[in-house]
């Protein structure tokens, strides 16, 4: 889980790049109460370094990102968020291996 703080109503782009093509990965966006707002997945067998993206307008507040592997071997990934129309960047840094 990674925390994301949005200070004003704004557009948010969340990008996840997964290195291992045989790992099935799910990226989810949740509100402060744990309610799932959106989810996207990379199925096993997708291209190498497949990118998952969530684009959404969010109100000011605290949100949580969840990255999880559902099937396949451990993999590395890169997770990044862009906030605002001009791509002001706020990083949610994590280059850890996903659990099996």
Image (cartoon, rainbow, N blue to C red):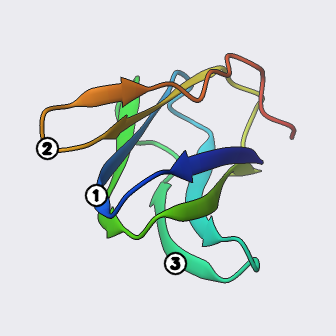
Taking depth in this image into account, of 17 and 46 the one nearest to the observer is: 17
Q: Position of residue 23 (x, y in %)?
A: 62, 40
Q: Residue at the location (32% across, 64% down)?
A: 9
Crowd around label 2: few <14 · some 14–19 · many ≥20 (10 Å): few
Q: CA distance from mark 3 to mark 1?
A: 15 Å
CB under 8 Å between discs 3 and 1: no
Q: Which mark is residue 37?
A: 3
Residue with the mark numbered 2: 85
N-terminal-most mark, 3 or 2: 3
- Determine whether 50 is above or below 27 in the image: above
Residue with the mark numbered 1: 10
Taking depth in this image into account, of 22 and 34 the one nearest to the observer is: 34
Taking depth in this image into account, of 79 and 77 the one nearest to the observer is: 79
Label 3: which secondary element: strand
Q: Which residue is farthest left?
A: 86
Q: Residue at the location (52% across, 21% down)?
A: 19
Q: Which mark is residue 35?
A: none
Q: CA distance from mark 1 to mark 2?
A: 8 Å
N-terminal-most mark, 1 or 2: 1
Q: CA distance from mark 3 to mark 2?
A: 21 Å
Q: Residue at the location (63% across, 60% down)?
A: 62
N-terminal-most mark, 3 or 1: 1
Q: Position of residue 81 (x, y in %)?
A: 42, 36
**Residue 70, picture quadrant:** bottom right
CB under 8 Å between discs 3 and 2: no
CB under 8 Å between discs 1 and 2: yes
Q: Position of residue 46 (x, y in %)?
A: 39, 41
Image quarter (top left, top right, bottom left or bottom right) of the C terminus: top right
Q: Is residue 35 left or right of residue 79?
A: right
Label 1: which secondary element: strand
């Amino acid at each position: 889980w990674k925390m994301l703080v949005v200070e004003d109503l704004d557009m948010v782009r969340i990008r996840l790049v997964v290195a291992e093509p045989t790992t099935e990965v799910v990226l989810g966006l949740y509100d402060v109460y744990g309610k799932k707002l959106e989810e996207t997945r990379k199925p096993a067998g997708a291209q190498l370094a497949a990118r998952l993206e969530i684009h959404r307008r969010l109100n000011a507040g605290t949100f949580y990102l969840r990255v999880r592997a559902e099937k396949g071997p451990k993999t590395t990934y890169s997770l990044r968020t862009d906030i605002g129309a001009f791509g002001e960047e706020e990083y949610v840094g994590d280059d850890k291996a996903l659990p099996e």
